[in-house]
Image: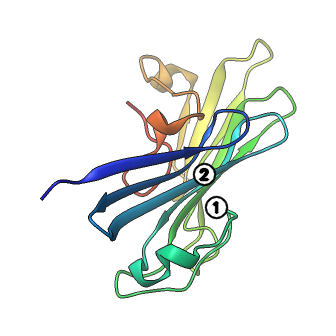
């Protein structure tokens, strides 16, 4: 069966909705929204296929739960310098957590990275890791959130 990927862009040519369809059936729906500076704010992998046609406009809002559970919503927070300093997962659910929280040195390098369980890595253990820019559809992970490539 032929499946078609459809991407809808906003007025600034940023992807805001991605679907995978075959015939008249939508199999997956992912959404994103952006802050005033054009950075990814929230991404959502919608889980309730019955709601795909009437889905919420705001990717930060949880939709109705289905057989596959609640929507997978990820939210990125930025510091005053525009660096992604916190990524929250399971936004809007009882399982919400700060998946990662970073601090930066005075010259803008990542200094520490703390995961949802409170494990903290310092600069020396972070060398060699690659952190993506959190914008655009190429960073949407399997649950609609950013991922490290």
Q: Which mark is residue 59?
A: 1
| The quadrant where residue 133 appears | top right
Horizontal relation, residue 34 to residue 2: left or right: right
- Nearest to N terminus: mark 1 or mark 2: 2
For the residue carrying disc 2, how many other residues have a C-alpha within 10 Å: few (<14), some (14-19), or many (20+)? many
Residue at (60% x, 34% y) in the render? 135
Horizontal relation, residue 84 to residue 79: left or right: left
Quadrant location of the N terminus?
Answer: bottom left
Residue at (17% x, 54% y) in the render? 2
Q: Which mark is residue 32?
A: 2
Helix, strand or loop for disc 1: loop
Q: Is residue 7 above or below residue 39?
A: below
Residue at (42% x, 58% y) in the render? 143
Q: Nearer the viewer, residue 16 or 91?
A: 16
Horizontal relation, residue 109 to residue 15: left or right: right
Q: Which mark is residue 26?
A: none
């Amino acid at each position: 069966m032929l499946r078609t990927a459809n991407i809808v862009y906003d007025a600034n040519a940023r992807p805001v909705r991605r679907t995978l369809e075959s015939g008249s059936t939508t199999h997956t729906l992912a959404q994103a929204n952006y802050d005033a500076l054009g950075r990814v704010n929230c991404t959502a992998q919608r889980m309730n296929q019955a709601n795909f046609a009437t889905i919420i406009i705001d990717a930060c809002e949880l939709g109705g739960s289905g057989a596959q559970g609640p929507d997978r919503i990820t939210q990125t927070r930025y510091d005053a310098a525009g660096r992604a300093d916190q990524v929250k997962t399971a936004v809007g659910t009882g399982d919400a957590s700060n998946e990662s929280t970073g601090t930066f040195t005075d010259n803008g390098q990542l200094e520490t990275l703390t995961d949802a369980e409170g494990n903290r890595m310092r600069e020396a253990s972070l060398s060699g890791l690659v952190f993506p820019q959190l914008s655009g559809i190429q960073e949407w992970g399997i649950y609609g959130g950013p991922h490290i490539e």
